[in-house]
Amino acid sequence: MTDDTQVVQASRIINAPAARIFELIADPAQQPSWDGNDNLVEAPGGQRVRAVGDMFTMTTTKGNVRENHVVEFTEGRLIAWAPAETGKPPFGHLWRWEVEPLGDNESRVTHTYDWSRLTDESRFPRARATTSASLAASLDRLAGITETR
């Protein structure tokens, strides 16, 4: 049984085309510019996600390199990944982005953090600290970038 507090979500309408928004989400090198959790420093270029099974690396603010395993993907609409330490299986949490076009220049974007399968209790405090407000901060930053282009 899943504790509802282990699945955190935020959603908002962004005045930009879905394709423009999704391109920023699917290109890991762009993610640090709009990460509302202030957890990401950099990702090497050339890692644009294209399918389930892809993997991209990211460096966190603590200097850790994470391998992010893509577990859900629909081009232009959905992407979700499960982070892991280099060469190890994923921790058990998931980051998901859904982009729904509402018109030519309007999209609903939903960001979800799901840690219901996280088993390493040392990671629970950080997981609990990820709130809908921090997810909304990412959405706001993403909107700021996509709405001005």
Image (cartoon, grey):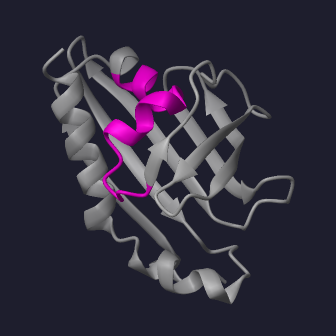
- Image spot of residue 92 (x, y percent): 71, 67
Q: Is residue 56 shown in magenta? A: no
The percent coordinates of residue 65 (x first, y second) are 65, 52
What residue is drawn where x is 40% and y is 78%? 129
In reply to whether residue 25 is colored magenta, the answer given is yes
> Quadrant location of the N terminus?
bottom right
Give the residue at x 73% y 67%.
91
Up-down: is 93 above or below 104? below
**Residue drawn at x 26%, y 55% as measured from the top left:** 136
Q: Position of residue 7 (x, y in %)?
A: 49, 70
- The residue lying toward the viewer, choosing from 62 and 29, is 62
Side (left or right) of 40 relative to 66? left
Q: Residue at x 53, y 32 (%)?
A: 28
The part of the image, by quadrant, that contains residue 53 is: top right
Q: How many marks?
A: 0
Image height of 128 relative to 55, above or below:
below
Q: Position of residue 45 (x, y in %)?
A: 56, 22
Q: In terms of depth relative to the viewer, which is nearer, 4 or 67?
A: 67
Looking at the picture, does residue 129 appear above or below residue 79? below
* Image quadrant in which you'd find residue 149: top left
Secondary structure mostly seen in magenta is helix
Residue 112 left/right relative to 124: left
Is residue 50 depicted above or below 6 in this figure? above
Residue extending farthest top: 104
- Which residues, given as a range, are shown in magenta? 21-39
Find residue 74 and report its image quarter. top right
Horizontal side of residue 108 vs 130, given as left or right: left
Q: Residue furthest left?
A: 148
